[in-house]
Image (cartoon, coloured by chain):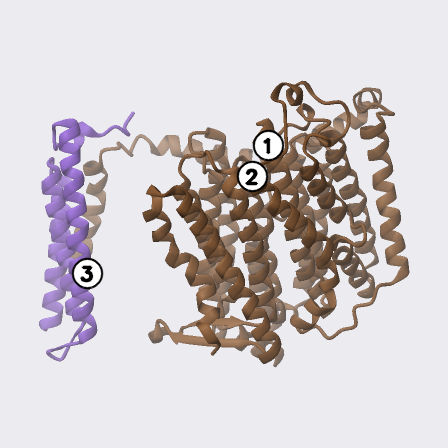
Chain colours: A brown, B purple
Amino acid sequence: MTMFYAEWLVWMLPFISIPFVLLLSHWPRVRNWFAAAIVGVTFLLALSLIFEVESNGPITSSIPWLTAYGFLLTARVDGLAAFLAAVVNSLGFLIVVYSQGYMGHEKGLPRYYALVLLFIGAMTGLVVAGNFVQLYIFWEIVGICSAFLISFWYDRPEAVRAGLKAFIVTRVGDAALLIGLVWLYVTTGTIDFQKLTTMASQGIIPVSLLTGAGLLVLVGAMGKSAQVPLHVWLPDAMEGPTTVSALIHAATMVNAGVYLVARTYPIFSASQTWLTAVGWIGIISALLAASIATVTMDIKRVLAYSTISQLGLMFAALGTGTPGGWFASQFHLMSQGFFKALGFLAAGSIIHILGTRNMEEMGGLRKRMPITFLAFLFSTLALAGIPPFVGFWSKDLILTELSLAKLNVQVLLVLVVSVLTTFYMFRALFKVFFGPESTLVRDRDVHEAPKIMTIPLLILCACVLVLGFTEEWAAGLLGVTENLTFSLPIIGASLVAFIVGFAPSYKTFYLGKPNPKEFLQSHAWLGTVRQVMLAGYGFDALYLALFVSPLSRIGKGVRTIQTGILAKNLWPMLVILLLLLVWLVMRL
Amino acid sequence: MNEQQLLQVFAAILFVSGFGAIASSKNLVKIIMGFQVMIWGANLALFAGGLVSGQVSFFSTSLVILSISIGASVEALALSLVILVFRKYGTLDPWEIRRLQH
């Protein structure tokens, strides 16, 4: 039992404060800062949890809940949970502070802040949950919050569609996760992570069950973490406000899947099939998404595909099956969270002022928005893995662990991903901040974002610079005792990958030799490849033809029986109820 | 048929008759009344579930009291909505005020 009951308060506090956010709607400024203050407090609580875990080891506290079924409401904070709670709440806090400026003139702010608090609280609850049922509840809350926040501007049809798409696509994963959980519960009789881990390590659970249930849980994680083939919701999720994108991509939603795999890793890792599946899904997603990011023109979509690709690297690291790889994935999660939040918030400043997401309409913003430029530059350098930025440490750790696990094909593919990452991030950087000023920039008389938005950016810049050096400490916190070495060949290889990615990007998009448009015209096959990538390799078209169109056709058919008159629709139900009643009386 | 089963059958009858009222009524107030009858049925079923050899468990009575209070507040809300509907449309017939139908 800790002082202040931090392991409970850290996720309950946002929930408790939601009614106050709604009640304070007559004092908008008070309400907005109240929401920020709450997340600030939960961040401090999460920090206190880290210190507590460091000095006294994992905290477990339970209260009885559904005792008839033997369930306990358990808050279990070990190194992993405390680490992630701190990441979620620190990023959440900065994003909520940034929202004060970014969302300042929007309507519907009570809804926005209530949902954001619910989102952050649910994500924290998810990481401190001690059993599968609790985790599943928070998992669903996170899903519904993201759908609502993506369609925050509900008067835009595309935003509503994107929210619905996010909800339905992740639902496929959620259903698989639920089936997996029920299967595990029915066969093992427990839902507690620790008990399951002990049972798995003693070899009581057969490997076939671990593989089956593990793969179902993995499908759930793929839905939330947007891995191929369930990644289609994430690029569309860019229709929401940029702060929400940052929240989904850096702090909360997408990390849930990686966290779930990391949390269940001790249970399922006995199954080699499961590990291989985790690794390859990650690699395939990383490659596909990184290649699409090189062609898209929407600045937020570049970052979105980059998120899928970085999450893929985390899955690849988890697939190594070593404690080092496990740690590398979580460290990369933290690192990705920070540099992606930085990238999104910097993009948000630009969108806030320019009102467009199309990179063709930007250009030459470097002098007009110096702080935003610095932020985007730092984010780019971190993503490209330049020392001493945090991305260098985490990406090289993943590469090292993959090579230690003798997965040479994967190492090579991750290097290809690095090349693509460097290419598309510098492409975005050059297009937005260098070159001649576009007419839009000149017409709008663009200037730097207000202080309330630039200060969180600067804090994140500092974090991205410094956090890489916390690697050893984080490994100790997460209980990984393995020696984390850096091999020179790996560093050399990633530097070569950087140069291979940077050089063409610099030549085409900074120097303009060859001019990208002329180059495309002279190489017809490149244009075809570009079209295929822009269509997202046809996943959307495939799903439309396979699921959406047949379903809407069936719906149109059923429409004739569904009159829309409640009383008429109720009659069949009444008949069934009467039959049930007769059956009940007959049975007595 | 013992006491408990008798109560359960009555609960089911209440539920179905409430449902029938909703399905056949053309007046929003009557629909809410039907809804109320359904809630009574559910409450009675809850109460009957707690009967063990003539004794009522505290658990089921407390659940019934909770359910009654929730039902009352839901009905109050529904009635207030009915008042708003009446002010806006001047009718209580749900068939006339439906707007979702094409």
Q: Chain of mark 3?
A: B
Where disc 2 sits, the SS reads helix
**Is residue A103 visible to the viewer in this orientation of the structure?**
yes
* Mark 1: amino acid: Ile
The total number of labels drawn is 3
**Is residue A320 visible to the viewer in this orientation of the structure?**
no
Mark on residue A148?
A: none
A351 to the left or right of A365: left
Where disc 3 sits, the SS reads helix
Q: Which residue is mark 3?
A: B67
Residue at image coords 61%, 68%: A268
Q: Nearer the viewer, residue A417 or A95?
A: A95
**x then y, percent, for residue A325:** 73, 64
**x then y, percent, for residue A565:** 22, 33
Where disc 1 sits, the SS reads helix
Q: Chain of mark 1?
A: A
Residue at image coords 46%, 39%: A164
Q: Is residue B43 above or below residue A233?
A: below
* Mark 2: amino acid: Thr
The N terminus of chain B: image quadrant: bottom left
Q: What is the CA distance from the residue labelled 1 to the residue labelled 3?
A: 50 Å
Q: Chain of mark 2?
A: A
A318 to the left or right of B90: right
The C terminus of chain B: image quadrant: top left
The lab-note entry on whether marks 3 and 2 share a chain reads no
| Quarter assignment of residue A28 | top left
Q: Which residue is mark 2?
A: A242
Q: Which residue is mark 1?
A: A351
The lab-note entry on whether marks 1 and 3 share a chain reads no
Name of the residue lying farthest toward the front: A451
